[in-house]
Amino acid sequence: MSTTSKNYDHDYALGSVPKSQKKGFLSMFAVMLGFTFFSASMWTGGTLGTGLEFKQFVMAVFMGNLILGAYTGALAYIASSTGLSTHLLARYSFGEKGSYLASFLLGITQVGWFGVGVAMFALPVQKATGINLYFLIAIAGILMTLTAYFGIKSLTILSIIAVPSIAFLGSLSVFKAVNSIGGMTQLLSIKPTEAIGLTTALTLCVGSFISGGTLTPDFVRFAKTKKTGVITTVIAFFLGNSLMFIFGAVGAAVTGKADISEVMFMQGLIIPAIIILGLNIWTTNDNALYASGLGFSNITKIPKNKLVIFNGLIGTAGAMLLYNNFVGWLTLLGSILPPIGGIIIADYFFVNRDKYLNFESFKFQSVNWYAVTAWVIGIIAAKFIPGIPPLNGVVCASIGYVIISGLKEKCFQTEAKVDEEISL
């Protein structure tokens, strides 16, 4: 019996997405825009807005999105070609049980951020409305878990509603903020309060989403063609991520608040603020919960939908604990994830030459220690090499994996030649 026939849900957690379930440009574009509408990017935009002049800001955002677009675009190509999630793709490079390491790290990080996101929604809403904090946490967590439970279809519907709403209300808030200081001329004349360098700015731009970007295949595997997958992903990162940075930057420059919901509270737009805050975190959290379900399903073979419920309950129950204690730990854990994506990219394009054997019939090795070694190399590079840490991690892990795989192949060829000579 094939892996696909063992799937327990309609999201193909344990196999490739069949052609009959692939989606066109508009559906994928909505999903990927919702994926890039990430609250942390707004806060990053706030740091950029107070640390850079306008031209520097534009350059940093463009270059950052270029790097993210190249990274996620490559993963999108692989996913739309194979129909496989990040976790199943990792089996080719890390081995079946080796992929459990990647799935565990990615999964636990996403559950953590889900809990943090629920708290990030509940705290400002409680402050503005006086509604009981834990009631808000429970309601938000349950609703977000329910939509994630129904998989890619509900993510598509949610994104179609959320993306234009966030874009419109965010733009309205930015327009009001700019008018409050006398127009664009005044905005552009604002000098940085704490200047930051371009390398630091690029690190912030890339680092704000590259860990999440490693999960791009979880969503783009539903793309009908490779062209659709790559184009929707790259455009979504340039458009969606840029909007998030701009919303955060303008708000921080004018009011000192990087979170656009806080800016809107200050502007008296309480209901729009709750809507934009809720939808923004909802899209982020549903993507996180969905991806965590895929990751733990790869490890346990338990149906993804059941794991989504379990993960959602854990994240909701621990929301305040996660918010108060684990943001730093989650950020640190997130910094070790990008090399996983780098190894997947290197394995597909350079080691296997743009071709994977059929997933359902392929016999995976248990653990590929060469991939694990390359992953460690990437982590060390991100930690100690000057420059942009997550990019260093991806590049060095990729190069290390290609070199190690090449040496392994050369050794095998040498051994085979020796055996042949002995037999003669």
Image: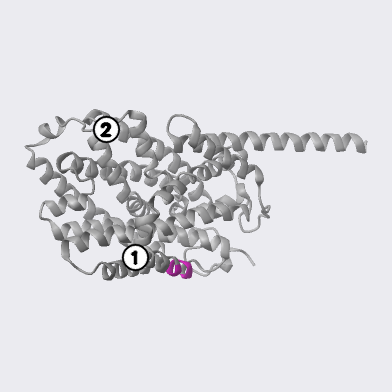
Magenta stretch? Answer: 306-310
Left or right? Give the position of 264 relative to 30.
left
Residue 307 falls within the magenta-colored stretch:
yes
- Structural crowding at the residue carrying mark 1, measured as other residues with C-alpha within 10 Å and reported as few (<14), some (14–19) or many (≥20): many
Residue 263 falls within the magenta-colored stretch:
no
72 or 22, nearer to the observer: 72
Magenta span: helix, strand or loop, mainly? helix
Does the image show residue 320? Answer: yes
1 or 2: tag closer to the N-terminus: 2
Say what secondary structure mark 2 lies in.
Answer: helix
Left or right? Give the position of 412 relative to 405.
right
Does the image show residue 161? Answer: no
Q: Residue at x 91, y 36 (%)?
A: 422
Among the 4 quarters of the image, the one containing residue 14: bottom right
Q: Residue at x 45, y 36 (%)?
A: 389
Q: Amino acid at mark 2?
A: Val
- Alpha-carbon span between mark 1 and mark 2: 34 Å
Q: Which mark is residue 58?
A: 2
Q: How many marks?
A: 2
Q: Position of residue 86 (x, y in %)?
A: 51, 52
Q: Position of residue 408 (x, y in %)?
A: 71, 37
